[in-house]
Amino acid sequence: MEYRKQSSVIPYRRHKGKFEILLLTSLSTGRFVLPKGTIEPNMKARHSAEKEAYEEAGVKGILLKPIIGEYKYKKTPQKGGYHCRVKVFALEVRKELDEWPEMHKRTKMWVSPAKAIKSVKEKKLKKILISFAETLPRLKNKKPKKD
């Protein structure tokens, strides 16, 4: 079976001493999701994840190494019914932009890791979020590795 390759990012920050994760609304369903998109030809998955964070959520930062998870899903028949494989990265947000490409198409909100886990409906992504949330205390004093 052939999968379309996608990348996703968990944008996170420390705010008032606590970690928060940025969620945004899906264009099609209005549910809360993470930035995600198809990896363009000649683009690495991690660079695609950074691009999606910018285009969909208007954030920039430092992408953590390595990949933090991967999951597969099938698009609904209305959207073509094809299969996707998604690589998930974590992005420590350093800058929120005032303007970005999809700013008028989506709503975004910073939430606690627990609320992010409850808000995301995709079960496999929820598991990745749970695992990531468990690593957050260890990130508190670590500097992210850059490319």
Image (cartoon, rainbow, N blue to C red):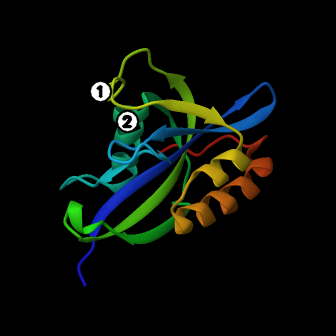
For marks 2 and 1, the one nearer the N-term is 2
Q: Is residue 87 left or right of residue 19?
A: left
69 or 33: which is nearer to us?
33
In the displayed image of the protein, which residue is found farthest to the bottom? 1
* SS for callout 2: helix
- Taking depth in this image into account, of 146 and 63 the one nearest to the observer is 63
User: Looking at the picture, how far across and down is residue 102, in whole percent?
Assistant: 32, 29
Q: Is residue 109 above or below residue 34?
A: above
Which quadrant would the N terminus be assigned to in this image? bottom left
Instruction: Identify which amino acid the numbered label 1 is placed on.
Output: Pro
Residue 51, numbered circle: none
Q: Secondary structure at mark 1?
A: loop
**Badge 2 is on which residue?**
56
Which of 22 and 5 lies nearest the eye of the viewer?
A: 22
Does residue 47 appear to the left or right of 22 in the view shown? left
Q: 44 left or right of 61?
A: left
Question: Residue at 36% across / 41% down in the picture?
Answer: 52
Q: Are marks 2 and 1 in contact (CB under 8 Å)?
A: yes
Q: Quadrant of residue 81?
A: bottom left
At 45% from the left and 19% from the top, the residue drawn is 97
Mark 1 is surrounded, within 10 Å at the Cα level, by few (under 14), some (14 to 19) or many (20 or more) other residues, namely few
Label 2 amino acid?
A: Glu
* Image height of 97 relative to 106, above or below: above
Q: Is residue 125 left or right of residue 135?
A: left
Report the residue at 39% width, 70% height from top.
73
In the picture shown, does residue 49 fall above or below 1? above
Looking at this view, is 47 or 83 the one in front? 83
Q: Residues within 10 Å of mark 2 (few under 14, many from 20)?
A: many
Please give the label number shown on residue 101.
1
Q: CA distance from mark 2 to mark 1?
A: 7 Å
Residue 90 percent across, percent down from the top left:
55, 49
Percent from the top left, x then y, of residue 29? 38, 48
